[in-house]
Amino acid sequence: MAVLNEVIHQSLRLKIMAALYAQAASEALEFTTLKKITGATDGNLGSHLSTLEQAGYISTTKAFVDRKPQTRISLTREGRRAFREHVAYLREIVELAEGK
C-alpha cells in the first residue's frame, strides 16, 4: 500500500503539484499563472512553494523580462515521483472505499 505524503497532501500544495505535473517535464509555470490556477494569494502561494522547494519537489528560477521580475516554477524529478506516488495512494483509498 502506498503511503500518505504529508507535504503534498495539504490542499493548496496538492493543487500546485497537480498544475506543475500537468506541464511537460521540461516546462515551468510562471508564478502569476500558478497563482491564477490555484486561487492563492501571493504570500500564501509563496509560503507553500517554499515548503515544496525545501522538500526538493520543485525548483524556481528568477529572471527579469522587460525589466519585470519573473519567477518560474517546475517540478523536479523527485517531485514528479512523489506526486505519482501520492496519486497512487489516493487511488488506493478510492478503490478500498468502492470495495475493489
Image: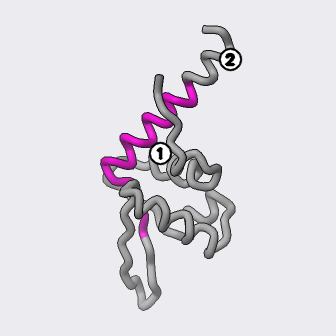
Q: Position of residue 87 (x, y in %)?
A: 51, 34
Query: Does the magenta run of residues contain 46?
Result: no
Q: Is residue 1 above or below residue 98?
A: below
Q: Residue at x 39, y 49 (%)?
A: 79
Q: Nearer the viewer, mark 2 or mark 1?
A: 2
Main SS, magenta region, reads helix
61 or 84, nearer to the observer: 84
64 or 59, nearer to the observer: 59
Local crowd at mark 2 within 10 Å, few (<14), some, or many (≥20)? few
Q: Position of residue 84 (x, y in %)?
A: 43, 36
Marks 2/1: CA–CA distance: 26 Å
Local crowd at mark 1 within 10 Å, few (<14), some, or many (≥20)? few
Q: Which residue is mark 2?
A: 97
Which label number is shown at residue 57? none
Q: Is residue 62 above or below residue 74?
A: below
Q: Which residue is mark 1?
A: 22
Give, as a single range, the part of the protein colored magenta.
72-91
Q: Quadrant location of the C terminus?
A: top right
3 or 77, nearer to the observer: 3
Q: Residue at x 51, y 51 (%)?
A: 7
Q: Label 2 is placed on what type of residue?
A: Ala
Tell whether 69 sits left or right of 12. Answer: left
